[in-house]
Structure formats: C-alpha cells, structure tokens
Image: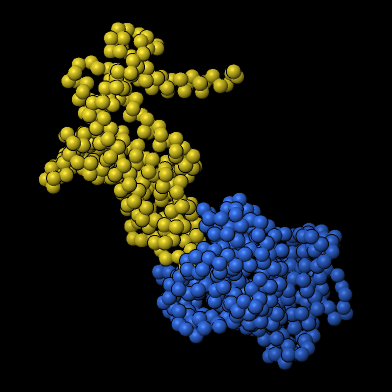
Chain colours: A yellow, B blue
Amino acid sequence: MRKRSIIPILYIAFLMLPIYWLVAMSFKTTQEILGGFSLFPQTWTLASYRTIFTDPTWYWGYINSIAYVTINTVISVTVALPAAYAFSRYRFLGDKQLFFWLLTNRMAPAAVFALPFFQLYSAVGLFDTYWAVALAHCLFNIPLAVWILEGFMGGVPKELDETAFVDGYSFPRFFLKIFLPTIKAGVGVAAFFCFMFSWVELLLAKTLTAVYAKPIAATMTKTASSAGYELGLLAAAGTLTIIPGAIVIWFVRNYIAKGFALGRV
Amino acid sequence: MALELQAVTKRVGQAVHIKETSLVFEPGRFNVLLGETGSGKTSLIKLMAGLDRLASGKLLMNGRDVTGLSPQKRNISLVHQFFVNYPHMTVFENIASPLRVAGLAASEIQGRVEAAADVLKLRPMLKRRPHELSGGQQQRTALARAIAKESTAVFLDEPLANLDYKLREELRDQLPELFAGRGAVVVYATSEPAEALMLGGMTALMQDGRVTQFGPTAQIYRRPNTLVSARVFSDPPINAAPATKTGDRMRLTAGAEWPLAGAAASLADGPYTVAVRPHHVRPMHAEASEVKLTGPIMVTELSGSESSAHFRLGEDTWVSLAPGVHPFEVGAAHAFYMDPANCFYFAPDGALVA
C-alpha cells in the first residue's frame, strides 16, 4: 500500500464507522448491544429483520414513506420541468428575482411550515394521507428541482430548440421527444435530490400524519419508547432506511458527477 | 419560388436590430449574407425562419404571405454555426427526424436519408450518435438533414465557421453542388469576404442591421456602392485616404498624386475619399503608371506565401498584400505602388462616384 492512500482510507473508515456500527447492531441481540463493547456480533440473529418484515406497523412505515416520496418526486419534477424551461429560455419581468425567491423557500426551517400545513390539511381533510406529506415536501423540492434542471437546460444551446421548430416539431413534441432525452441526466439528478430530501425529512412527515400515512422514521421513534430498549430492531430499521437511498445513488451516480460539474448540485 | 422581404424591420425593446430591409432571394443559386459579427446576419435569418417576430414589414414565400406563420409551417431548414444535432438520436434518425415529423412513409424516409447520406459521405456513420462524430461529420449531418427535408428555403448561418481550415475548404467546395438543382432558396451567412467570392451567386452586404448593397457577387465586389460596402467586402479592410481633385489630377492629403482618366476625370473638383484593395498595393514597382506611396512600416505578417505590411500613410494606416516573401523592416520607410486604375473614388457622403 502506498503512503498517500493511507489518509483517504482513514477518512473513508471514519465515515463508514457509524454505518458499520448500525449494520452490526442490527444483527446483534439486545442483550449483546447493552452488554458491552463488541466489534462483531457474537451471536448472529435475523430476529430484528424478521420482526420488521412480519409486523404491519413496521413494514407499513416503509410503504407509506416510499408512497409519499414517490408521489412527491413525480410532482416536483413534473412541475419543475416547464418552470425550469421558462427560466432558462425566456427573459421576462422579474425573472431573476423570482428565481432567487424560489430558492429562499429552502432557507426557512421546516418547523415554520409545520403548523400552517397541519391546520390547513386538517381543515380540508388531507391530514394523515400520502398527499399531505407529498404536497408539503413540494415546498422544498420544487425550487430545488427547478434550480437543478435550469442548470442542465442552460447547458443545452437554444439553437437545438430552434432547429427542432424549423424541422417541424411542435412545442410539446419537441419537449418530450428531443428536449427531455437531451437533459435526462438533469432529470435523474433532480429526481434523486427530491427523493433524498423527502426521504430524510422527518418533521413535516411526522406532524402531518397520524396512523395511515405514518412514515418509517416516525414508526422508529414511537416503537423505541413504547417497548423499552429494542435497539437491535431500531438498528435493523435504520439499515433498511439507508437501502433505498443507496439504490437510487447507484443509478444516478454518473449523472450526479455531471451535476457537480455544472455547479448546480 | 422566391423569398421576398418587404420593408422588414426588427426591434428588441427600443433597440433596432434590423433596419428596414427589402430583398428578393431567388432559388437556384447561393444568396450570401456578408457582414461582420454583430452586423445582423443571424437576426435576419431568424426573422426569415420565423424564429423571431418582425416589428414591421412582410415576408413572402412564393408569393404567399408567411409573416405570421410559425417556423413549423414554413417548410424551411436551418443549419447553425454550432453543430446542432439531436444528441440522443443516431445519425440516421437525425437526418430522418423532419421527415418523421412530416409523417412520410418509412420507405420514402429510408430513400431520402440514404440519398442525403451518400451525397455527404455519411453512409458508414448512420448508426452512430452525433457525439461519436468529428466536427465536420456533425455539421455534414446537419446539412444532410436540411437536404433530405427538401424544403423551400435553406438557411445556413455560418455553417463552416467552427470547422478547421481543411474541413472548411472541403465542405465549402461541396456546398454549391449540394444545393444545385434542388430548387430551394439558399441563404448563406458568412463573415468572410473570400467565402462570398468562392460561393458566387448573389451577395447582400450587411452592416449595423442594414443591407448596404445587394446584387451578383462579382459585380458587388467590382463596384461597391458606398465606402461602407467596400469596407464590408474586403479582407483585410480596404485602404482609404482623403484626397482632393483639382483639374484632372487627384492628390492624396498624404502626398501622392496622379492624373485621372475615364469617368473619374469628369468629376467636380473637391474633396474625395480614395480607396484601394490591399492586394492592389504592392511593395515593388511594375508598371510605369503606378503611383508611389511611401510610409513607415508598422507591422508585417507572413501568411502562407503572402506577406502583408501595415504602413502609415498620413493619418491613415494602409495595408499592402503581395505574394512572395519581402524583406520588410519594421519602423523603416518603404515605398509601395498602386495602379490608379484600381482605385475607387467616393464622395464625402460615402457614395461611389467613380
């Protein structure tokens, strides 16, 4: 091993330590976790995972989370696409201000919006539905998606649009058949970030749901307090929470590099 | 089959981008728009293509008013300076795309694409994607798309500007025959006078959003109507200097003088501007009738087998362009010679008088 690879290896080990600890914990029994320091599980057990996959209060947490995250990602990207196109292709009164204002939505803490959303959704009967969380998360994710997509669209010369119009493409046809495939990397990156932010957001998701749409993260906090120290179960739930993100990252890893190159991620 | 602009103008906010322009472009030969960067060539092409709206005026294609028609309905093609192709499509699909949109039969599309690919030597690349091609091949793909569409008008906006020298030459030689006999109106924008001369046909000179002169290329080159037109259609820029006519002699403010003959002799006495192309100013004496101009050399350049020298003539800087390598010494005075027969005479308002 060369000398200069030591530092990155140490750094990666440092980053991976909590994740390793989480995964190791999920295979330990509660007694072993509470019993003292052990680097590897002394007695391997899949009991925690078995509980999660058989108990509806657990696995419905995942289904709920995936449901609202998916709805949110689809809405955010669909709505952001035309908005980003307008920002990248047209000059209109106050366009730069509006673009900046979109971003400022991300600057306010989610807690600010928790109360108004809670009251509003209770009043219109959206409380404790997938749509409640999905729509609430749009507040953060649409501006983000617009920002990312605008960066990618700005990298496509306007001449492409002009060539397509001259070639006879109507606007919708051009957008779907030419433009979208051209910026598919951007769509991938935008979708990834919407997914990620919606997946890890806890406060709004917890506030706006009670039973039927309760996200996995909320399930985790509640189960921990009611049944005492079920640390193995919690660790297993945590490990499973990382998996969807890891899968999505695997698919968009090349696109994200492009996004970084554009300075928009 | 003609493209007619009637008193067309374009404004962006308060700024006038295209001043009132009336032109008729005929099919069957190259119509060149010649002007510097920013002179309005691209603006004019966008207006004709329907990508920008006219502020006033009318646009007719084959006598039909298309002023308000969207680009999709104009049956035109456009090739940009940058190589614009659809990146996710193969070369075949790129060439076929306008035909697919038009809803042509698959066999017809196949035939037309292959014919266009053959002409532009793209046969072996049909299955590749644009980013796998060289710059020249990408631009040939764009040209093939324009040809396969068989449109009424084809706009080429400096299509060769981003190609390297060798490819540019090769493609330029091919261009006229590419469109010959297709019956389309071809408008070709360029900033290089040499290209206009090589492509022949008609030339419209543009400056500051205005067409200063329009006519057969050779005729415009020989008889620029104004000093502005002469400047646009000359590379390096045409040499000009103030002069005064007295009797049958023209005398440069900078010193040299010569007897006038022909039309120039009958001009009224007074101030004029004399202009002569750089390659008509030579560093050595050849004919007895030549006028001697002397000035200190400021800059010299050697490009290929031609050498150019910038020298000071009174208040102006003149350029001499001559074949061969000459022993110029920067800073030293050098004698240059021009034949008065090659001189243009412009009135103080800029109009050509002789």
Side of B354 where A236 appears, left or right = left
Q: Going 41% across and 57% down the picture, which residue do you hit?
A: A176
Q: Position of residue B244 (x, y in %)?
A: 70, 82
Q: Let me know if residue B293 appears in the view.
A: no
Q: Going 49% across and 77% down the picture, which residue do you hit?
A: B19
Q: From what the image shows, is residue A58 above or below residue A144?
A: above
Q: Let me know if residue A122 appears in the view.
A: yes
Q: What is the quadrant of residue A112 in the picture?
A: top left
* Name of the residue lying farthest toward the left: A123
Q: From what the image shows, is residue A202 above or below residue A138?
A: above
Q: Position of residue B104 (x, y in %)?
A: 50, 69
Camera-side residue: B71 or A169? A169
Q: What is the quadrant of residue A51 in the picture?
A: top left
Q: Position of residue B269 (x, y in %)?
A: 69, 89
Side of B290 where B170 appears, left or right = left
* Name of the residue lying farthest toward the front: B107
Q: Quadrant of the C terminus of chain B?
A: bottom right
Q: From what the image shows, is residue B279 above or below residue B352?
A: above
Q: What is the quadrant of residue A198 in the picture?
A: top left
Side of A182 where B240 appears, left or right = right
Q: Position of residue A179 (x, y in %)?
A: 45, 56
Q: Going 61% across and 50% down the picture, which residue do you hit?
A: B132
Q: Going 42% across and 61% down the picture, which residue do you hit?
A: A173
Q: Quadrant of the N terminus of chain B?
A: bottom right
How many numbered marks appear? Answer: 0
